[in-house]
């Protein structure tokens, strides 16, 4: 299971790393990508608040960014 | 967005005094995006938010964030964030429900509280206020190389956390691809009220006004404070797939060393299967966790722009050397409403699903007379559990294009039995109660 998941995640990464010619856009094709909602962290404030909740209530943290320490939350 | 024309040199001089902190690699990507729309002026952007979190019969918390981001004319970015939160209410102490009334001593040793028959033991003495400051500085250091560094300080009544972080990102293929690497280092000091309990020592219960009480309570303590160090390494890769789609993949390695036990948590020690009072608590002992934990995770995120709507989906797989594994699926779907329900308004449903397995040393209870394991904790947060969140966000533009949004979410935790046989009366009580919470948030950006 663990191996399969790693594979699923790593294959697209390798495709990207090898610079597949069909990937990517020219600078003048960034009209949609430039929108706020296309940002990988579109709502950093929401993300920070959510991270705090789930860090306090579940056994996992980080992944998108740093898991970190930061509070003795209960 | 407010724009101020300022003399760069003055701002820079002022900013050398400023501290800088924590953002992940995604912020570096944002910085790159910003560089494509370079302006002649330096700009300030402010985000303010208030969040209310409330569990049924348990903890309630309020959290306020004020974030100030300054983008300079040459795309250097300073981000300063202030977070204040306050927490009050009851938290599970780790003990199991019983068919009779139970009495527990408060973590401070100062007084006791009772729990009704059949109820999950909750300690209602929790209240804390936390102030956190983050500063982060991001800039180009060479063509296609963006660096970022930051500091973090967080203080609450019984807890101090200090942290630093650094990131570097490399763009290539017309900025369609980005490799990034980052680290963070946190040093936390925990000074719990009542001190650090001796692992597996029995909770002292009795007359807390007795002359010998303080000495007897002190016998269950090993110190007044302890520390932990957290070191994280993050490797990321971002790829623009096409005009409509962008993806991100991260690998993270996190090492925590030091005091990882929860000083407020206990474990019920109950009579065994063959006893006449099978399942009845005989003792409450303080929990004990290993002094190190190594967590790793793989994270993937994709954002796709349909003709009008935008779908953002992420998945995280986490595993650690406590034998906890977890899956997190998170998705948001942004639906623009045009100007019908407010200028450039939108609705954004949110769905999150989370599932974790139990830590190797998780024990919902211990059996009286059995040999004690090396480590044990009855904290449901490291037990087997499934949670989901459903929410809806509504946003619109108000005065001069400022963003205003409201978010309402429902969060449910469903702890499950990881395969522990329940002796006697424990079969008749709720050992894995579900927890329901409401999350409400208002955000204003200007």
Image (cartoon, coloured by chain):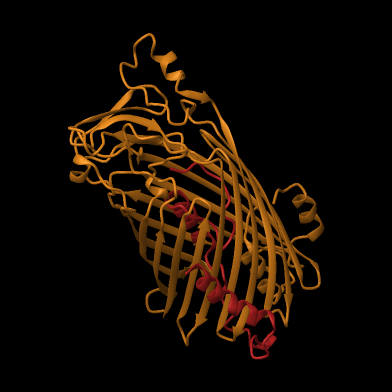
Chain colours: A red, B orange
Classify residue A44 as left or right of residue B369: right
Q: Is residue B2 visible?
A: no
Residue at image point 56% right, 82% down:
B245
Counting from the top left corner in percent of width and height, residue A5 is at: 51, 71
Counting from the top left corner in percent of width and height, residue B253 is at: 61, 57
- Camera-side residue of B316 and B7: B316
- Judge whether B147 appears above or below A28 on screen: above
- Judge whether B126 appears above or below B85 on screen: above
Classify residue A25 as left or right of residue B417: right
Q: Is residue B213 visible?
A: yes
Residue at image point 68% right, 68% down:
B31
Choose top left, top right, bottom left or bottom right for residue B170.
bottom right
Residue found at the far bottom of this picture: A22
Q: In which quadrant of the rendered image does the N terminus of chain B lie?
A: bottom right
- Camera-side residue of B185 and B145: B185
Residue at image point 65% right, 87% down:
A25
- Judge whether A35 appears above or below B385 on screen: below
Q: How many numbered marks does the figure carry? A: 0
Residue found at the far top of this picture: B211
- Camera-side residue of A70 and B355: B355
Residue at image point 27% right, 41% down:
B120
Counting from the top left corner in percent of width and height, residue B98 is at: 22, 37
Q: In which quadrant of the rendered image does the C terminus of chain B lie?
A: bottom right
Counting from the top left corner in percent of width and height, residue B35 is at: 71, 73
């Amino acid at each position: 299971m663990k191996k399969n998941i790693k594979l699923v995640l790593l294959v697209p990464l390798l495709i990207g790393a090898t610079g597949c010619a069909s990937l990517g856009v020219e600078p003048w094709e960034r009209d949609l990508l430039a929108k706020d909602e296309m940002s990988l962290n579109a709502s950093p404030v929401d993300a920070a608040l959510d991270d705090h909740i789930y860090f306090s209530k579940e056994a996992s943290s980080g992944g998108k960014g740093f898991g970190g320490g930061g509070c003795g939350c209960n | 967005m407010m724009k101020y024309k300022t003399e760069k040199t003055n701002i820079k001089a002022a900013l050398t005094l400023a501290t800088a902190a924590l953002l992940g690699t995604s912020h570096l990507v944002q910085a790159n995006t910003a560089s494509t729309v370079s302006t002649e002026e330096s700009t300030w952007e402010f985000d303010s938010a208030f969040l209310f979190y409330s569990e049924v019969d348990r903890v309630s918390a309020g959290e306020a964030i004020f974030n100030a981001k300054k983008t300079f004319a040459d795309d250097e970015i300073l981000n300063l964030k202030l977070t204040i939160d306050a927490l009050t209410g009851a938290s599970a102490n780790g003990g199991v429900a019983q068919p009779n009334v139970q009495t527990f001593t408060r973590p401070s040793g100062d007084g006791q509280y009772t729990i009704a028959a059949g109820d999950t033991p909750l300690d209602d003495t929790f209240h804390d206020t936390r102030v956190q400051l983050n500063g982060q500085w991001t800039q180009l250091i060479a063509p296609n190389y963006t660096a970022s560094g930051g500091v973090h300080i967080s203080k609450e009544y019984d807890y101090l956390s200090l942290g630093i972080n650094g990131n570097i990102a490399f763009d290539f293929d017309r900025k369609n691809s980005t490799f990034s690497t980052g680290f963070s280092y946190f040093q936390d000091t925990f000074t719990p009220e009542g001190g650090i309990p001796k692992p597996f020592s029995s909770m002292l219960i009795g007359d807390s006004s007795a002359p010998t009480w303080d000495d007897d309570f002190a016998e269950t303590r090993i110190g007044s404070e302890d520390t932990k160090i957290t070191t994280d390494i993050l490797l990321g890769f971002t790829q623009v797939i096409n005009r409509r789609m962008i993806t991100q993949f991260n690998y993270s390695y996190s090492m925590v060393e030091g005091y990882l036990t929860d000083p407020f948590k206990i474990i019920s020690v109950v009579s065994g299967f063959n006893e006449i009072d099978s399942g009845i608590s005989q003792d409450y002992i303080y929990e004990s966790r290993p002094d190190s934990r190594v967590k790793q995770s793989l994270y993937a995120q994709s954002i796709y722009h349909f003709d009008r709507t935008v779908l953002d989906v992420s998945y995280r797989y986490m595993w650690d050397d406590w034998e906890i594994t977890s899956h997190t699926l998170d998705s948001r779907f942004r639906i623009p409403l045009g100007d019908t329900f407010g200028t450039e308004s939108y609705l954004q449903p949110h769905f999150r699903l989370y599932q974790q397995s139990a830590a190797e040393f998780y024990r919902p209870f211990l059996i009286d007379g059995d040999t004690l394991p090396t480590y044990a904790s009855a904290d449901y947060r490291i037990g087997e559990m499934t949670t989901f969140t459903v929410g809806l966000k509504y946003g619109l533009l108000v005065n001069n294009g400022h963003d205003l949004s409201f978010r309402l979410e429902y969060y449910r935790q469903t702890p499950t039995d990881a395969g522990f046989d329940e002796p006697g009366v424990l079969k008749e009580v709720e050992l894995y109660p579900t927890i329901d919470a409401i999350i409400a948030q208002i955000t204003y950006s200007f």
